[in-house]
Image: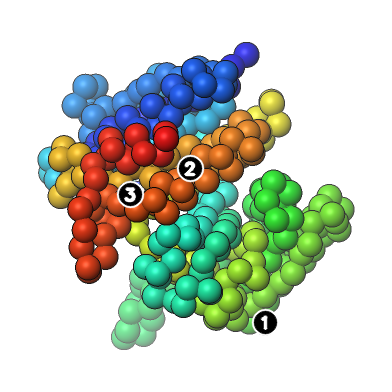
Amino acid sequence: ANPSLLILPGDGIGPEVMAEVRRIIDWYGEKRGIVFDVEEGLVGGASYDAHGTPLTDETMARAQEVDAVLLGAVGGPKYDVLDFSVKPERGLLRLRKEMDLFSNLRPAQCFDALADFSSLKRDVVAGLDIMIVRELTSGVYFGEPRGIHMEGNERVGINTQRYTESEIARVARSAFELARKRGNKVCSMEKANVMESGILWRDVVTEIHEKEYSDVELSHMYADAGAMQLCRWPKQFDVIVTDNLFGDLLSDAAAMLTGSLGMLPSASLGLPMANGRPKALYEPVHGSAPDIAGQGKANPIACILSFAMALRYSFGQVDEADRLEKAVDATLAAGARTADLLGPEGGTPISTAEMGTAILG
Ligand code: NAI
Ligand code: MG
């Protein structure tokens, strides 16, 4: 059977950037004989407009069945007045929750042509290609007890960092699996020096490594030292695995080593399905960009690179993922720039569709 892909373009620039991915998917069918069974659905405001809900049960069920879901973006000012229960982002949250996507992948990848965009020196970032794996469904954002209460005559705010062994083990496995498809190196980050959950984290990652992934190189770092090393010499890393809170900070910092929001892909992975591949949702990091929606100005690269991640991590097409990333690199090297990629010196921007055409070569 052909690999199956559910495409949910969503709102704002979502459909505009997704149209360029559709052209690339067609190209794979025509030129490379790699045919995907693509179905399209509604999510976010688009789904609310059609069905009164940001995600229908039917679309949710399809998301559980396909090999991968590719989502554009959701939200927009038109929907800000809606009740919380039907807000566009609830559609995305429902997908993440019901698919149990506990492993959030945020690459920091620097295309040579954009290396001078970074606030860091060119040789520190040029050619950078690292992946932060952030645990997404547990830890201090979810742990109990939590709340604000009175103690004596003042208020106390409480959150609890809590990780079970199995929660650590599954995200560790996800990171080791990824490392095998990349540079075969994992660095685990926690604060085992001051946190009990950090001690357990380090123990469990070490055990999983010894038992199941001893072919992968493993190191450990305290998360604060890791933040420093990420800025000092990020190329020392391949895959970094860390908890929800540290991953939130480290992945935002790492992403910005390299440049524009319009360039950043992401993936959220769950447990392996019957075919051995993880449940997966791929999406650009950016939102629906209402300020430029409908004008053909959006940079489609974040969405295109999200599809490249799907090729690599869901469809087993590592060579084709490399090919697509190289096409993006070559296009940028040739000087193609959407408006978001123009520096202070300016220049003439190309449109969303022109960028898609340039990448297709
Ligand atoms: P945003 O990411 O949509 O836009 C921030 C800025 O970056 C804007 O100036 C926008 O024009 C620019 N930008 C974003 N993507 C771009 C691209 N591909 N090419 C060129 N420029 C790009 O974030 P914002 O403005 O905070 O949120 C707008 C809407 O998107 C809100 O309704 C928000 O809730 C939603 N949102 C949805 C997300 C998702 O679907 N995962 C994530 C973040 C925000
Ligand atoms: Mg964040």
Q: Which of 319 and 250 is in front in this view?
A: 319
Dividing the picture into quarters, in which one does residue 205 lie? bottom right
Residue under the point 69% across and 26% down: 275
Residue 25 percent across, percent down from the top left: 46, 26
Mark 1 or mark 2, whichever is nearer to me: 2
Q: Residues within 10 Å of mark 2 (few under 14, many from 20)?
A: some
Q: In which quadrant of the rendered view does residue 283 lie?
A: top left
Q: Disc 3 to disc 1, how far (Cα)?
A: 47 Å
The label number, if any, that marks residue 281 in the structure image: none
Discs 3, 1 touching: Cβ within 8 Å: no
- The quadrant of the image that shows the C terminus is top left
> Mark number for residue 336?
3
Q: Distance between the residues labelled 1 and 2?
A: 44 Å
Q: Nearer the viewer, residue 345 or 234?
A: 345
- Residue occupying the point 28% across, 38% down: 354
From the image, tell me which residue sits under label 1. Answer: 193
Task: Tell which circle, 1 or 2, labels the residue nearer the N-terminal end.
Answer: 1
**54, above or below 36, in the image:** below
Q: Residue at x 47, y 73 (%)?
A: 122
Residue 235 x, y percent position in the rendering: 61, 69
- In the rendered structure, which amino acid carries the disc numbered 1? Asn
Residue holding disc 2: 327
Relative height, residue 186 to residue 100 (above, below): below
Residue 324: % across, % down: 51, 39
